[in-house]
Image (cartoon, rainbow, N blue to C red):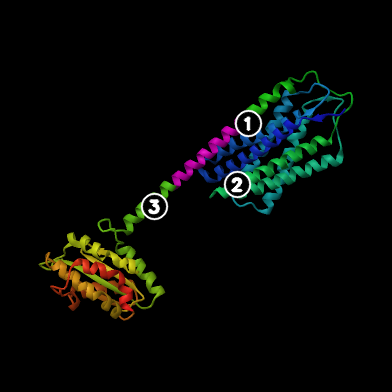
Amino acid sequence: MQGTYDPSLVVLSILIAALASYVAIEFAGRIFARRDQRGRWLTAGAVAMGSGIWAMHFVGMSALMMPIAITYDLGITVFSWLAAVAVSALALFIVSRGELNKLNLGLGALVMGAGVCVMHYSGMAAMKMDPGLGYDLPWFIASVLIAVGASAAALVIVARLRTVRSWRDVGLRTAAAAVMGLAVAGMHYSGMAAVQFDPNAFCAPGNLLDGNAIATPTVLASLLGLGFALFFAISDARAVVQARRAARAEAERLNELAFVDRETGLVNRARFGQQLVEALRRQPVSSVASIRVLDANGEDARERVATVAAVLAPLQSSGLVLARTSPAQLMVLAEGLSAEAVRAALLPGWHRLAAGLAGQGVQLAFGLAEAPADGDNAQALMLRAASRSAEREDEAAPAPRLGSLAAFQAASPSVRDSAA
């Protein structure tokens, strides 16, 4: 007895297999990302993936048009579905454990291939034909080998595409799902080619499932189920991405609180110390300038630090680092510049700045330290520069009638050029 295939059902069966494969990849990613919900995603993924693969085989069997009515035994049909779910659970369990080594891959492929064969051939046995079905040995062996090979390929693909970082990864998942779908379909149709029907065979009268009656509901249920499963997996992936973005934003906020002075927007003492350490590793000769902001009585004028910081901010565009290291103190890091070069570059604008602030009752004390002459570590250099600013060296003396704040602001971006 010979049968013919309905091309539309064959194509539909391959599409269902590809969709089930994509769902498997998505759920593997969810299990990997949701360690705290591993059991839930493993169970849901096994049911969704197994049902999709089972539906593919069922539709593939329905695609074979026979000259007799095809019916199925309910119990054996349910068993074949359970076998598909169990195989899917095994696959997701293997790929969610971590790195896929050769031993896990080999054993997993063998067990999964055996499970796929059990699902397929038990589904065929559910017809309970009399006389019974025969099988062509070469095609039977080919179907088993394809099942094992497809299982191994599925494990490798799912394990490597668990994480999506770009649209390229989405494309790879789609292509991989298509390959897996063709592999699963290849196993099914090679298994169908192995079947030999007796010319007088017929299905058992006691079979409860009419093949023609349940084909459409099975297709609709599988497509809807896989669609909903894919929707929930993608929605969860988006939720995870949003949570990670929120966590990164919170980490950045905490980092800003830890390393940025909120009043001036400059880096604080802790971050400045780190940058100074990094600079000393790159350049053995570097300088640190300390600027202390004082009122007319020589007391700390912390309320004027933001004003001074705003005027000095253009220094940062020339490669210098400006920081607020204490309530009334600013520091400048000149990487690769000697104290003499910094003094020559900064003093002209410095005197103009001091003169402009003097009329507002603000004094500035300037201190300078150079590595390695004044210290070879960040702490020593910062302390040396701060102590010199406290001593009010000659650089701190204001020079009246020498210009305004705007003059210093205009001159400050060219510090390195002046130093040269």
Disc on the earlier residue, 3 or 1: 1
Is residue 362 found left or right of 133 in the rendered image? left
- Per the model, the C-alpha gap separating discs 3 and 1 is 42 Å
**Residue 328 location in percent, x, y?**
20, 64
Q: Tag 3's secondary structure?
A: helix
- Per the model, the C-alpha gap separating discs 2 and 3 is 31 Å
Residue at left 70%, top 23%? Answer: 214
Quickly name the residue at label 2.
171
> Can residue 227 be found in the magenta stretch?
yes
Where does the magenta region start and end?
223-244
Residue type for callout 1: Leu
Quickly name the residue at label 1.
223
Residue at left 66%, top 34%? Answer: 52
Which of the two marks, 2 or 3, is nearer to us in this view? 2
Which of the two marks, 2 or 1, is nearer to us in this view? 2
Residue type for callout 2: Gly
Residue closest to the eye, 68 or 149 = 68
> Can residue 60 be found in the magenta stretch?
no
Which of the two marks, 3 or 1, is nearer to us in this view? 1
Residue at left 80%, top 21%? Answer: 69
Specify the label residue 251 is tagged with.
Answer: 3
In this view, 389 is above or below 124: below
Residue closest to the eye, 203 or 294 = 294
In this view, 298 is above or below 8: below
Q: Tag 1's secondary structure?
A: helix
**Residue 10 location in percent, x, y?**
74, 33
